[in-house]
Structure formats: structure tokens, C-alpha cells
Image: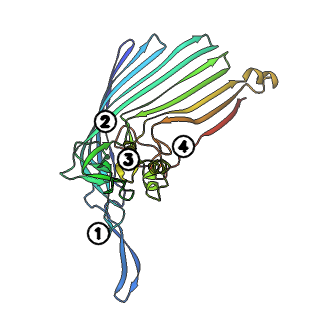
Amino acid sequence: MSVSYNLKNQKFRLAYGESGRLPYPTDARTSYVMDGVSAYGPIVHPQYKGNPNIKPERMREIEFGSDWTIKNNHTLSLTLYAQYTTDAIIYEDLLSSDGWIGSMPNNVGKVRGYGLELNYNGTLWRQGDRHSLDVYANLNYQTNKVTNTGGRDITNYPNVIKEGYPVYAFYYHTVDGPSFNRDGSYNTKVGAIESSDYAYLGKPFPAVNGAFGFNLKLFKNFTLGTKWNYALGASIYNQSFYNVSGLGDNLKKRNDQLQALANATVGTPEYNQIADELAKSARFRANYIEKADFLRLSTLYLGYDLSTLARKWTQNVVNGMRFSFAIQNVFVITNYPGADPQVESNGGTRRQRGIGSLSRDITNAPHPRTYTATLSFTL
């Protein structure tokens, strides 16, 4: 449901909507698998544990926005929104000691979210139909908070669904410092001292993300375009590096630190500083919950219109012809040391504007760089 009001160069928008997410057809059903036959009858073992009380997830959203047209060459739009999710469907890991594997669906009480979306499109320069420069940019801000879980926490450490924190927040023990032997040398077996309390360590979705780019036209026929993507404020559990760090010190950063420690004198400030760095790379989960801000040149595009030449060469049999060349994923600038700051272990990329995911890097592969050349024509 939406309403709008138009002025000469401005438009106001107000909308309200509801959506839902149904459980999987098997989410309510507990099933077993027959594993053989004995003298007393069939032998079965648990397969999936269902939740007969599972309910559909419901999300309500209200948004207010405005669009402006400035001198016919620039458009600007602003949207503010609020989301209220009830009975969010969350899959909670089961304990194998209880005889089950996998996860069981549960409904979380309430999640509240807010956001802002800002978009700009404009022509900064134009000379007839020969030259032009068009630019665009968008910025999205989002946040959410779990407001009711029915008095319990749903844990899949280091992620947790806990009242007062973002959905799937990173919430775990912190590392207090290095572990030393009695003689003052660094204890390589223990590595670090972990706190007994839990602390908030970040959220799996960006606070700010968006894109920007331009399309440049020169001499009527030549075009050059780019698209950049960026994100700020997200964290990733780098489980790939966490696993490698515990396999014979095969993580390069940690191996370099151990070599530096071997050349330092026990008890000196230099030795203690290296030990502190080793504590921060030891195999503890908090050490591998890492920032994942990035700026990526997603697309670089070149094109040339050959229509005039095509009509001349073919005596107007071919009416239009265009050659283009594009590179996808040109490069990325990021503070995340893993393979890619965007790839999810369950495939795809992190969801925006809604309940996110665990944001775990488990032997993820980076985005590929692709090259595409196209020659198109019309008759």
C-alpha cells in the first residue's frame, strides 16, 4: 500500500507493506532413516528433528521518501524505512550428544530494524550528442536489533541471537594477552589467555554500503564506464585462517612472528611485544573475527559505435554495429586478510536490508575476474 504527492520538481512517498517467509515443508516434521533389520524389527536412526510449533516469519515495513529533480539534469532520492520482524525463522544447531545432527528451526520473538537509502543520478557535462558525462551514486545505512527472544539466547558461536544486539552478532570470549611459562618465555602450546566473560565483537552486515560510477561519452562513438561497490562496518569470522593457524603454525603471519620471537631475548620489551602479537594470532575465535571494509572496482567498460562504418562497408545491409569490452572484478581494496570480503560460506553475498547471515569464511574462493568482448549488430 502506498501513496504519493507530486509537486513541480519534488515527489513525496509513503508506503506500508507486509511480507512473510514460510518454513520449509519438512521443518515441522521429525524423520528417521531405516538402517537395517534385526530380529526385533527395523533399525532406525534420527535424520531430521522438526519443530511442530514452527510458524511463518512475518515482516512489516513502513517507509517514507522524497524525490527531487534539479535543473532537469540531476535527480536525488531519499528513503527512510523501519522494519519489524516477528517470529523470525532461525535454524539452531543441535547437540550430537542428544542423538541428533544438523539444526532445528525455531521462531525468534522480535527484531527491529531501521535504514536509510540515498540515490543520486546526474549529467555533469554535455555537448550536444557528441560528448557527455553521467554519474550516479547510492548510499545505504542499516541497523537492526533483537528486541525479544522469549528470554533465551540462540547460540551458534561465535554468532548469537541475543536481546539488545544485532541479529547474528559476534559475541564471544576475548583474548586478554599472551601466555607465559614460569621462566618468562612465551607458551606456544597455550598461546594466549582467554577471558571468562563474553563480549560483543562486531556484526555480520555492513552499517554503510553502496555503489557509484560514471559513464563517459566522447566524440559520439566512444564510451567508458565504471561501477564501484563499497561497504563499511561489517565483520567476518575468518574460519579459514582460524583452522590453518592450528595446523602446525602454517599461517604465514604467525610463522613469521615465531621466527622473530626465536631471535629475541626473553624478558625484553621486544620479546614481550612479539609475544603480544602472537597472542593476537593464536587459535582463538576472537582473533579471527576481522573487519571487512572494502572498495571494489566491480566493472570497467569500454565501447565503440561502429554503425557509420558498418553501413558504409555493407551498403546499409547492417544498420548498426557496436563493439564493447568489459572487465568484471578489476580489483578490491580491503582490510580483510582473507580470500574475499563479500563471499559467503553458504554461497552468494550477504543480504542487505534485512536479517543477515552468519558471515563466515570457510575456505571461500574469491570473486573471479572475468573479461567479456562483444560485437553486436542490427539489420
Vertical comparison of 249 with 328: above or below:
below
Vertical comparison of 83 with 216: above or below:
below
Q: Nearer the viewer, residue 24 or 83?
A: 83
Of callouts 1 and 3, the N-terminal one: 1
Which residue was labeled with disc 3?
280
> Which type of secondary structure does the marked residue at label 1 adopt?
helix
Measured Cα–Cα span from mark 2 to mark 3:
29 Å
Q: Nearer the viewer, residue 182 or 89?
A: 182
Number of marks in the rendered image: 4
Q: Is residue 241 left or right of residue 304?
A: left
Q: Is residue 301 left or right of residue 107?
A: right
- Does residue 345 appear anywhere in the picture? no
Question: Residue at 35% of width from left, 69% of height from top?
Answer: 31
Q: Nearer the viewer, residue 185 or 51?
A: 185
Residue type for callout 4: His
> Which type of secondary structure does the marked residue at label 4 adopt?
loop
Measured Cα–Cα span from mark 1 to mark 4:
39 Å
Q: Position of residue 132 (x, y in %)?
A: 59, 15
Residue type for callout 3: Lys
Task: Quarter of the image for the C terminus: give it.
Answer: top right
Of callouts 4 and 2, the N-terminal one: 2
Measured Cα–Cα span from mark 4 to mark 2:
26 Å
> Which type of secondary structure does the marked residue at label 2 adopt?
strand
Of callouts 1 and 2, the N-terminal one: 1
Which residue was labeled with disc 1?
98
- CB-based contact (under 8 Å), mark 2 and mark 3: no
Of callouts 1 and 4, the N-terminal one: 1
Q: Would you call the spot at circle 4 few (<14 residues within 10 Å), some (14-19), or many (20 or more)?
A: some
Of callouts 3 and 4, the N-terminal one: 3
Question: Residue at 33% of width from left, 42% of height from top?
Answer: 203
Which residue was labeled with disc 2?
143
